[in-house]
Image (cartoon, rainbow, N blue to C red):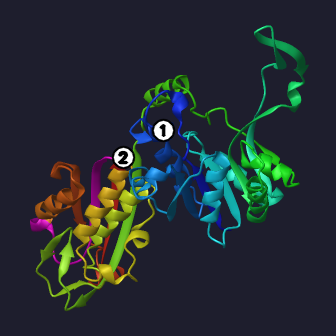
Amino acid sequence: MHVTAIIAAAGAGRRVGRPTPKQLLDLGGQSMLARSVAAFDSHPRVTDLVVVVPAELADGAAGAHVGGTAREVKVVAGGPRRQDSVANGFDAVAPRAEIVLIHDAARPFVSGDLIERTIDAAAAHGAAIAALAAHDTVKRAKIAGGGHVVVETIPRDTIFLAQTPQGFRRDVLAAAIAVGRSGVDATDEAALAERAGYEVHLVAGDAGNVKVTTEEDFAAARRRMEGQVPPGRVGTGYDLHRLVTGRPLVIGGTTIPFDRGPLGHSDGDVVCHAIIDAVLGAASLGDIGVHFPDSDPAWKDASSVELLRRAAAMAAERRFEIVNVDVTVILEQPKLRGHIDRMRASIAGALGIDPERVSVKGKTNEGVDAIGRGEAIAAHAVALLK
């Protein structure tokens, strides 16, 4: 099932009281927009994203907030109202998309579980939104005597507070947007879907999925981030290449004299390839095949150290720091002991870290299987990011 997420981030966000739109404010090292994008980019059921930003950012300036994603991201300019911005985003949704999610960038704490349940409900019912049941007593008031006066107390068991994501089958959202374009004003797409004649189902929301609207909200969000100990992110990588004559043996960015080398589209450096997958995996950015496919002639005979440098830059764009990497090379011949220090230096240079944070170990396969027969080389890598 093709699921597209539209991230609505085109609002001025001035109620926070700052010149910068609230969705672009830094929250624990990333903007709220970047955090929202990352939540959907890392979800296994989301296929691609459309990010709607202020017009002045749509020409490329939004890259700092949406760069380095594993999935395709289209950036489009918003409109004067939220519903206009979402409509612009919907125009950029691929025709093959079956389910479309809409999420406010100002809700940076959305969970993968809530995304999952919204997708399921939208697929089952056509339209579904995350919502919280009202727990406080709800009053309807009128303006009188220079203030507000209670008119009635509303039964709270029928009151729900809408959140995002909101999910729709493509045809349902198309009908809702058509209603909005006909002149109907609404504060969310669920209201437009209702006007289009569709039932909108409720998904149990998440109290932690707060919307940052005011300066007080932003201060609370910062306190929430400061109270969290950022967990380490661990990624693993593995690579194997056949060894053939006529190819240089490149391991960890170091060319080692030998009569065979790895067969590959690039230089076949299994150490760099394994580390690339470990780094990308820890940052939830996919794998080497996503970013450097062997079908792309641009990477033909490419230096894997350069690919590693690019992978590290992608992680850095997502505000990750590489703490250390540990690699085990499995190769029958030649012995690697005299080359380890050069490998560590080369890898460290590509990653932008001290060589002391890089470990490379060599093992044989004791004559077992293709590696043991000298027909192949493999490497395992682990990377820790924070």
**Could you give the CA–CA distance between mark 1 and mark 2, rounded to whole angstroms?**
20 Å
Specify whether 359 is left or right of 14.
Answer: left
- Residue 225 visible in rendering: yes
Amino acid type for the residue under numbered disc 1? Pro
Give the residue displayed 66% in from the left and 46% down from the top: 114
Amino acid type for the residue under numbered disc 2? Arg
Give the residue displayed 80% in from the left and 52% down from the top: 193
Task: Name the spot of residue 121 as percent of width and height, x first.
Answer: 77, 53
Q: Which residues are magenta?
A: 321-339
Task: Name the spot of residue 306 as percent of width and height, x first.
Answer: 24, 68
Which numbered disc covers residue 70? none
Determine the secondary structure under disc 2: loop
Specify whether 110 is left or right of 160.
Answer: left
Residue 8's place in the image compared with 141, above or below, is: below
Quarter occupied by residue 185: top right
Q: Which residue is mark 1?
A: 21
Query: In which quadrant is the C terminus drawn?
Result: top left
Q: Which sits in the foreground, 22 or 46? A: 22
Task: Name the spot of residue 105 as percent of width and height, x first.
Answer: 56, 44
Quarter occupied by residue 332: bottom left
Label 2 Cα neighbours within 10 Å, binned few <14 / some 14-19 / many ≥20: some
Give the residue displayed 32% in from the left and 69% down from the top: 273
Task: Name the spot of residue 345 as percent of width and height, x first.
Answer: 14, 59
Determine the secondary structure under disc 1: loop
Specify whether 325 is left or right of 162.
Answer: left
Specify whether 128 is left or right of 283.
Answer: right
Q: Of callouts 1 and 2, which one flags the residue occurring earlier in the amino acid sequence?
A: 1
- Residue 121 visible in rendering: no
Q: Which sits in the foreground, 182 or 226? A: 182
Give the residue displayed 10% in from the left and 80% down from the top: 257
Mark nearer the viewer, 1 or 2:
1
Q: Which residue is mark 2?
A: 319
